[in-house]
Amino acid sequence: MQHIYRSFNSKSIFHSSNLLKERLREIIPIKQALLRDIRKQYGQKEICKVTVDQAIGGMRNVFGLFYDISLLDSKTGITFRDYNIPEIQEYLQKAKNGNEPLPEALFWLLLTGDFPSDQEFKFVQEEWKRRGELDQETVKFITSLPKQLHPMTMLSQSVLYLQKNSTFQQAYESGKATKPQYWEYYYEDAMDLVAKIPRVAALIYRHKYKNGNLISSDNSLDWAANYSHMMGFDQFNAYELFRMYLSIHADHEGGNVSAHATHLVGSALADQYLSYSAGINGLAGPLHGLANQEVLKWLIEIREKLGDKVSNEKIQEYVLNTIREGRVVPGYGHAVLRYTDPRYIHQKNFAERLIKDDPLVELVKQCYHVIPPVLKTIGKIQNPWPNVDAHSGVLLNHYGLKEFEYYTVVFAVSRALGCTANLVWARAFGLPIERPGSITMRWIEEKFGENQSVK
Ligand code: CMX
């Protein structure tokens, strides 16, 4: 417990030996100038038209957001600063004898657009260790949360509690923060929040499911392995799973609910804690991040109802029944992607490399062959292929995390990387408060109907 209780004395936010902030100080004026040029040259160009259907239908293919740190292509999937998942696996730092990218390195990439040198990577790692401790009041707050709450609700409340540490909120309230400095406070809050979030998440897990039997952090471990350790999973391959999982879920461009909610709330100058907690609340929806818990529930349900060895025909029937009952088949489909999610493929490769003889992993593999052809027969489904959530649950389950209600928390820990990195840039670019226009049915009728009274 010693590590968890030790509180951290924050240094001045303008402390000079801050490698990542120094790098940002170099890049930000260059990027600001680039954005000014882009606006000057292309500001009046039209990106796309918006139809009434799109306005009503969740704004699919409406490109109305600026989000510079990652991009999603409907065919090839996510790129983080232009690098896809196999590239980040190849080029980012890994643990000794490990194969998976380390989230510390990914965070540097998301913030700067560069792969970190070993020294830069080490800097992030050490900073997160230095900033990661939780004060006693925070530990008390988390371990007093009612255990019947969903772990995502607990996470959101805990992040809101941590808001007491926001350097931006304090500086803004005292009138000290000036607009050109906003990003520096957002950077400090990002580093603190990301450093602390695995401890918060692990405390929630141990409090809710393990009788409050807490495990101290081990600062000899990297950020992801330490999270796995504080949860109680100490095999090397569990560490590898956490490193992989926390890297590939970090960001998925700006339009998904968690990234967009964080970005939107941040645009009102709500600090990192308030904004990311809004993102967590969106991630907790079953059509978004909560799908990972739903997948495992659904797979276990199949095995309970149909037995250990399920035929392809029985799975097909089960899928059709799920749809007939008005439910979605969790882990399949996507609002943007039109092929198998590369994050699914990466997890599939991980399982093939490291996991033998796990019936649930085998069932996921079988579903990959059986489900898409069935979904293709349902004309309205745009994407019959698996998304990231179709695979993650069985991997966590394999290494001992059986409480599937908790799965979205692991997703949220990863999403902290992208959500907070983006907000640093949103403030560096001085992006304004978001305020899209909205329309009513009457407006539509008056605009396009016979009288056309709306201009
Ligand atoms: N099972 C059953 N029906 C599905 C479906 C699925 N897996 N995927 C899409 N559909 C249905 C939609 O519900 C919609 O039906 P209605 O018109 O009756 O409302 C229709 O097919 C058209 O949907 P779409 O255009 O293909 O997909 P959307 O962009 O509307 O929704 C998503 C995307 C992810 C919400 C949807 O595919 C879905 O509900 N999938 C299951 C839940 C899931 O896995 N979510 C996780 C996504 C990844 C993440 O964010 O973590």
Image: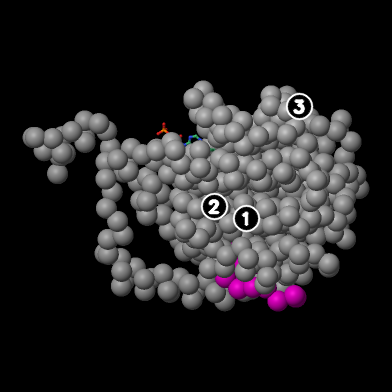
Using the image, determine if residue 122 lies above or below residue 320.
below
Using the image, determine if residue 241 lies above or below residue 401.
below
How far is the residue under mark 1 from the one under mark 2? 7 Å
Kindly indicate whether the residue at mark 2 contacts the one at mark 1 (C-beta within 8 angstroms): yes
Using the image, determine if residue 75 lies above or below residue 399.
below
**Ligand 1 within 8 Å of the CB at mark 3:** no
Q: Position of residue 332 (x, y in %)?
A: 54, 42
In the picture of the structure, the residue carrying the numbered disc 2 is 340
Query: Is 103 included in the stretch rendered in magenta?
Result: no
The answer to which of marks 3 and 2 sits earlier in the sequence is 3
The amino acid at mark 2 is Thr
Q: What's the magenta region?
A: 108-119
The local crowd at label 2, few if under 14, some if 14 to 19, many if 20 or more residues have their Cα within 10 Å, is: many
Residue occupying the point 83% across, 67% down: 97
The amino acid at mark 1 is Ile
Kindly indicate whether the residue at mark 2 contacts the one at mark 3 (C-beta within 8 angstroms): no
Provide the secondary structure element on which disc 3 rests.
loop
In the picture of the structure, the residue carrying the numbered disc 3 is 147
In the picture of the structure, the residue carrying the numbered disc 1 is 345
Residue occupying the point 16% across, 39% down: 447
